[in-house]
Image (spheres, rainbow, N blue to C red):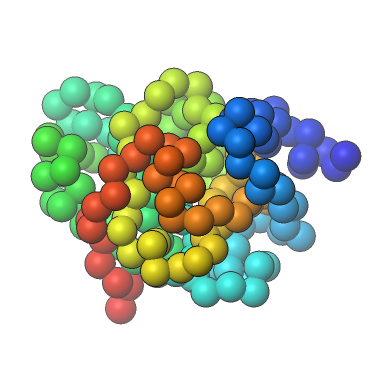
Amino acid sequence: MSVVLSHAGVVRVQAALAAAGLASGIVELPGAARTARAAAGFLGCEVGQIANSLVFRGASSGEPLLAMSSGARRVDLQRLAALAGEPIGKADAEYVRRHTGFAIGGVAPVGHSQPLRTFVEQSLAAYGEIWAAAGHPHTVFPLSFDQLVRLTGGSAAAFAEPIA
């Protein structure tokens, strides 16, 4: 097994996928996929098929919020705040690591260090196969929109706009 696939974050994601009965295999990419465009390039898929894991902070509660959005879209913070029921702000790298257990660029939809309230961008449903980070910037795994919603316990909603 490669060093990347034995990384603690990747092992946590693999365990969470197995516990959920998801047989998707984790794929090691030839380089870091810190952007949806880079991940799509490595995978030979559309940018929209990349499910970005974006962590925000509730401005009032301080609680983390996970937004699973399409790589072809930009999160509308006002729409997301309306769904969350409070203003939201960006989370810095330390906050993301503390609340998810992952570094930015490898935040997976599962395997977090604590449960996260999650919203899944409805536009991802347009794709039969989507790809999400698997605990390290060099790893991803395939799944369907329905599997992503079930896996995260998230609420499907429209909260992002196409990137011009």
Q: Nearer the viewer, residue 20 or 136?
A: 20
Looking at the image, the residue that sits furthest to the bottom is 164
Residue 113 in view in this figure = yes
Residue pictured at 26% horizontal, 60% vertical: 160
Taking 63 as reference, is 53 left or right? right
Q: Please identify the residue farthest to the front as the structure is shown.
A: 21
Q: Nearer the viewer, residue 53 or 21?
A: 21
In the rendered image, the vertical position of residue 80 relative to residue 152, given as above or below? below
* Quadrant in which the N terminus is drawn: top right
x, y percent for residue 156: 29, 49
Position of 75 compared to 42: left or right?
A: left
Side (left or right) of 117 relative to 128: left
Q: Disc count in the image? A: 0
| Placement of 125 over or under 114, stated as above or below | below
Quadrant of the snapshot with the C terminus = bottom left
Q: Of all residues shown, which one is farthest toward the right?
A: 1
> On the image, which quarter does residue 29 sit in?
bottom right
Q: Residue at x 50, y 56 (%)?
A: 144
Q: Position of residue 153 (x, y in %)?
A: 38, 35
Q: Residue at x 32, y 72 (%)?
A: 163
Q: Which residue appears at 63% of the width and 51% of the height?
A: 140
The vertical placement of 41 against 109, above or below, is: below
Up/down of 158 relative to 152, above or below: below
What percent of the width, then of the height, locates residue 103? 55, 37
Query: Is any part of residue 94 visible from this angle?
Result: no
Residue 161 position within the rendered picture, expressed as x and y whole percent measured from the top left: 25, 67
